[in-house]
Image (tube, rainbow, N blue to C red):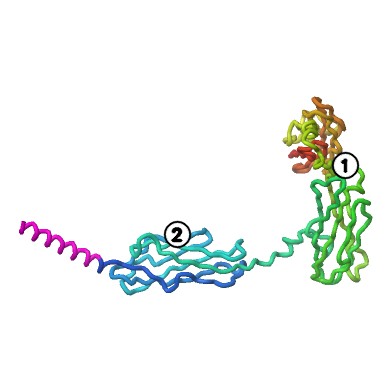
Amino acid sequence: MLNRNKLVFILAGILFAISSISAQNNARISADELIYNFGTIGESDGLASHIFTIKNTGNGPLVITRITASCGCTQPEWTKEPIAPGKTGEVKVTYNPKGRPGPFYKTIAIYSNGKKGSFSLGIKGNVTPKEAQPILIYPYSIGDLKLQTKNVLYSTVRPEETLGEKINIINEGKTSLNIHLGKTPHYLNVVTNPTKLAPGETGEISILMNAKEAKRKGRMTAEIPVTVESIGQKKGTEGKLHVAANIIDDFSKLTASEKAKAPVAQLSGTLLDFGKLPDKSSFIPLVGGRVSGTIEITNSGKSPLVIYSVTCEDERVAVSGGKREIKPGTTATFKVTVRPKEIKTKLEALINFVCNDPNGPVRLVKVTANK
């Protein structure tokens, strides 16, 4: 019994000695700060970096094995050599503000032999957005007048609705500009504010669409003449704004029973591809110098399908045939024709159908071809 107790005492002493030696050789990680605030930085200022000072407050060498970041926008670099007890190393954290305006808070996790699990550091700040380049905001021009767009589309408008859109404008010239609008359709009210722009001054063109005044359903298109005159210029620069609107039925008034009895438009496809068009050297015969294809619309509903309009705003594409009213269970065929000689490289156009199908009053078919 005595020998057994003596053995236990000896083993306990050995374990205590080992644990004491181990404790003396433990590394411990610490940092001069846990979170760094960049404050306000500009998105266009480029990369922002900060160096954290890492200290080994333990008794053994500190080895950083890896560091991970909470976001790909944050990149860490660190001291790869072992850090001796009482000595310091560095962790450099770089943040990329590009495309990230607004406040941010990102973390990095440091894995080492100085702490079980990970040791976390953070960075925060606020990114002010870069100033957009005028060419990106105003890519269209009429003389020195730059415009946000020249095309305004009212996707769907109900017969009793009045909807407004606006086009932002700026004078990028060195002299004042006078802006004059030409004659517009009676269902559009177009106003420029202001009508005179000093150099660098911004304004807007407001366009009000009154569907009730249009007095019909279907696609409406209009061109608004715009003349821009520079002070001292004898003749102004002319341009046009393009406005389109799809005037549809007010389906919000339909009951469930009426919807169940409504027409249903089924198109044979939403893409009509003519492929490679024949040229003058081709032996493929052309009828009148044209090639054609067809689009079929079937009414699978329970009441007549009314086609209010069939339009294509690309003059190289012509649509003919079909019916303006398709009875339930019947099909109408529309002929689509293009002239190869008018297509120099490729064709990408849209045919627009407006009908009384409550589940799809506006249908688009893309027409493509190439030389």
Dominant SS in magenta: helix
Q: Position of residue 89 (x, y in %)?
A: 38, 71
Is residue 321 in the magenta section?
A: no
Task: Tell me the tag on residue 217.
Answer: 1
Q: Give the CA distance from mark 1 to mark 2.
A: 60 Å
Disc 2 residue type (three-letter): Thr
Q: Position of residue 31 (x, y in %)?
A: 41, 71
Task: Tell me the tag on residue 367.
Answer: none
Segment colored magenta: 1-22
Identify residue for label 2: 68
Badge 1: residue crowd in 10 Å (few <14, some 14–19, many ≥20): many
Q: Is residue 342 visible from the viewing direction of this image? A: no
Q: Is residue 361 visible from the viewing direction of this image? A: yes
The local secondary structure at tag 2 comes to strand
Q: Nearer the viewer, residue 75 or 56?
A: 56
Say if 162 sits above or below 310 in the image. below
Give the residue drawn at x 80%, y 65%. 170
**Quadrant placement of the N terminus:** bottom left
Q: Is 23 placed left or right of 197 in the picture?
A: left
Say if 199 sits above or below 302 in the image. below
Residue 22 occupies quadrant:
bottom left
